[in-house]
Image: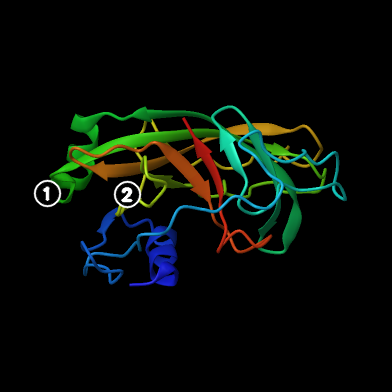
């Protein structure tokens, strides 16, 4: 099952856990999430990140940039017919509520440990991005690769978030959270942004603890 099918499940409000098979990029039948190689750093960038954009026409963070928790990435953003520039700041990566996770996903949660990726979204370009959904971030392990587990769905303590009607001017902000998971004994050590808008699909922006 490819990313399009995962997006469709998410749009339909389906809660699912996707697990990639060991030694294969082919997903299991529940859903799918391929293991990915560590994101290479773009030439000239460091873990201190690229310059922030000062406005709609300013510079954006280069694909492949490595950041630390608390640093922001500025990226082009598109939601339906709305376009603009936003800043994403990963503020925390924390282990989630195991009991709530198991209650939400049942047997599919067996052997999985939930994690919350918390981040803030800022309207940098000053365009009308009202009612847009938060961009999605994906979990990575200590080796920089995918954890091999994808989660579609939220918990009350970790909801994706959506812009309000006031998210129309530069400086407007809101908070978001992405529910992810690792296999038992594993760890979520970072997050990546790999949307195709802006060229990040093949070279994601990465935040690490």
Q: Position of residue 104 (x, y in %)?
A: 23, 42
Return the residue nearer the eye: 45 or 22: 45
- Local secondary structure at mark 1: helix
* Residue nearest the observer in this picture, 56 or 147: 147
Foreground pick, 165 / 134? 134
Rendering quarter of residue 139:
top left
Quadrant in the picture for residue 26: bottom left
- Tag 1–tag 2 contact (CB < 8 Å): no
- Picture residue at 63% right of the left edge, 41% below the top: 163
Q: Position of residue 45 (x, y in %)?
A: 68, 44
Give the residue displayed 56% in from the left and 62% down from the top.
201
Q: Disc 2 on helix, strand or loop?
A: loop
Q: Is residue 78 left or right of residue 117?
A: right
How many tags in the picture?
A: 2
Q: Is residue 115 left or right of residue 111?
A: right
Left or right: 116 with respect to 119? left
Residue 21, horizontal then vertical, whole percent: 21, 63
Tag on residue 126?
none
Task: Tell me the number on the disc at residue 147.
Answer: 2
Residue located 13% across and 45% down the image:
110
Query: Residue 159: image x %, image y %?
Result: 43, 38
Q: Quadrant for the N terminus, please.
A: bottom left
The residue that mark 1 highlights is: 107
Going from the N terminus, do you reach mark 1 or mark 2 first? 1
Examine the rendered structure and indicate whether residue 26 appears above or below residue 56. Answer: below
Tell me the distance, in whole angstroms, between the alpha carbons under discs 1 and 2.
19 Å
Q: Nearer the viewer, residue 159 or 53?
A: 53
Q: Residue at x 33, y 57 (%)?
A: 14
Is residue 18 shown left or right of residue 65?
Answer: left
Q: Please identify the quarter of the rendering in which residue 87 is found.
A: top right
Q: How is the image coloured?
A: rainbow
């Amino acid at each position: 099952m490819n990313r399009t099918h995962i997006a469709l499940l998410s749009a339909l409000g389906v809660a699912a856990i996707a697990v990639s098979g060991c030694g294969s990029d082919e997903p299991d039948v529940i859903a799918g999430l391929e293991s990915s190689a560590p994101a290479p750093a773009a030439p000239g960038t460091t873990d201190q990140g690229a310059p922030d954009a000062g406005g709609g026409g300013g510079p954006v963070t280069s694909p492949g940039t490595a950041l630390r928790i608390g640093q922001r990435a500025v990226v082009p953003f598109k939601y339906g017919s709305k376009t603009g520039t936003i800043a994403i700041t990963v503020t925390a990566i924390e282990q989630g509520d195991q009991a709530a996770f198991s209650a939400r996903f049942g047997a599919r949660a067996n052997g999985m440990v939930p994690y919350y990726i918390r981040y803030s979204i800022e309207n940098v370009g000053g365009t009308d991005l009202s009612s847009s959904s938060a961009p999605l971030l994906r979990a990575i392990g200590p080796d920089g690769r995918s954890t091999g587990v994808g989660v579609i769905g939220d918990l009350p303590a970790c909801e994706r978030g959506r812009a309000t009607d006031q998210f129309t001017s530069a400086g407007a902000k809101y908070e978001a959270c992405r529910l992810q998971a690792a296999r038992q004994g594993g760890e979520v050590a970072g997050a990546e942004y790999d949307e195709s808008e802006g060229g990040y699909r093949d070279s994601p922006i990465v935040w690490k603890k």
